[in-house]
Amino acid sequence: MLDLIQIGLGSLALGLKALTVQNVIMIAVGCGLLYLGISKDYEPLLLVPIGFGAVLVNIPLAELMGEEGLLRHFYDFGVITEIFPCLIFIGIGAMTDFTPLLENPRILLLGAAGQFGIFLTLLLALLLGFNLMDSIAIGVIGACDGPTSIYVTSKYAPHLLGAVSVAAYSYMALVPLIQPPIMRMLTTDRERKIKMSYPEKSVSKALKIVFPLVVTVVTCLIAPMGTPLMGMLMLGNLMKESGVVSRLTKASENELANIVTLLLGLSIGATMEGAAFLKPQTLLILGLGFLAICLDTVAGVLFGKLMCFLTKGKVNPLIGAAGISAYPMAARVVQTEGRRYDSSNWLLMHAMGANTGGQVGSIMAAAIMLSVLKGLGLG
Amino acid sequence: MSNFSYGLVITVIGMGGTVVSLWLITLVVDLLKRAFPYRESEEKERKEVV
């Protein structure tokens, strides 16, 4: 009888006995993410479920990522099948207003320049010894676009999903800290004070409705592999602009986006199991991801300077920094920086235009990469 | 073909393709703006509805 009691009590200590140093470190990392989300308000919608998922998956013997584990079901259903990132894009589309972009379509080109960091980082990752698929997944952190990063990584390098998504979302949250020094370094005082005019004419409702449809057809014909992402983004936007399916629009931007964000965050956190995550490679990926976003900002601002030169000073180069996909954070950073040097300077709407261009640009860059890979027989 | 060569091909086509695609969209938007111009009456109608 005493033996049985001892065995019974011993079974309660099994979890503690199986706890490894790696588990403890990753539980601390998970708590760190929770702290950033809760106390610092850095992307709390994502960092809270990711952080909690990381804590859960590092509890020994719980087997949450085992064959029949709860988090494994979420992961297999939504991430492996690429359903979650696509559903998130419907919500993003329903929340995005392309009007500033339609008022000044040339700004869309800044959204292309803002993706150069993806490709430069891809080359750097290859030089550092990563294989091609891993390098593509690492480079795409520079899209500064969580769902796109997850979509590409789950397709080609699922073993890097934890590191890539944590990097993508953490750096998105850190855009207000990462971008300003680069923007100041690359622009002159005179350039930062340039005031941009606002066009008087507005955009017709018909144009706003036709735009998502036309963009879908044009971009998906060029790079068909991006159709799930671009198609869902533009479907969300079409629903919003048409105004005839307000229930679907509201559901997309609220219930759908919230539920998928929760499950996606937990699934990403579930990939942060100590033994798999704690490798020197992870630190390298985090470093390369940081570099990718810095390079995006550099390319965007330099392209802004080129536009400033070509338009004889009518474009403020700062708005180039908004050509990344971190919406609307990057646009807010531009507005804040502009006003820091001239409090009467309002760059927000122009920056919003570049920022929505960055959203389209990041999907396009990923879609082209996927399509080229398929064309080369590698995808 | 080495991994780096593949990477270079993807980089060149990726960067060029992204710029050209977005440039094409700006041209299309310009055309669409002509096809669906903004009318003052539209704004008035919207204000009335509001």
Image (cartoon, coloured by chain):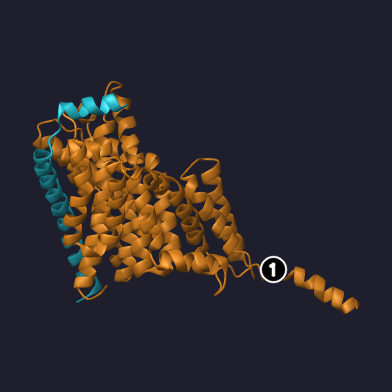
Q: Write the residue at 20% across / 46% down.
A: A211
Between residues A174 and A281, which one lies in front from this camera angle? Answer: A174
Q: Amino acid at mark 1?
A: Gly
Q: Write the residue at 16% across / 58% down.
A: B17
Q: Write the residue at 23% across / 70% down.
A: A373
* Disc 1 target residue: A15
In the image, residue A189 above or below residue A245: above
**Local secondary structure at mark 1:** helix
Place of residue A213 in the rendered image (x, y in percent of width and height, measured from the top left): 21, 51
* Chain in orange colour: A
Q: Write the residue at 19% across / 77% down.
A: B1
Place of residue B47 in the rendered image (x, y in percent of width and height, measured from the top left): 27, 25
Query: Where, quadrant-wise, is the C terminus of chain A in this rendering?
Result: bottom left
Between residues A368 and A126, which one lies in front from this camera angle? Answer: A368
Place of residue A375 in the rendered image (x, y in percent of width and height, measured from the top left): 19, 72
User: The residue marked by circle 1 belongs to what chain?
Assistant: A
Picture quadrant where residue A350 is located:
top left
- The answer, for residue A378, to whether it is visible in the render is yes
> Left or right: A88 with respect to A267?
left
Place of residue A264 in the rendered image (x, y in percent of width and height, measured from the top left): 46, 57
Query: Where, quadrant-wise, is the N terminus of chain A in this rendering?
Result: bottom right
> Left or right: A18 with respect to A130?
right
Chain B's shade in the image?
cyan
In the image, residue A152 above or below residue A45: below
Q: Residue furthest right?
A: A1
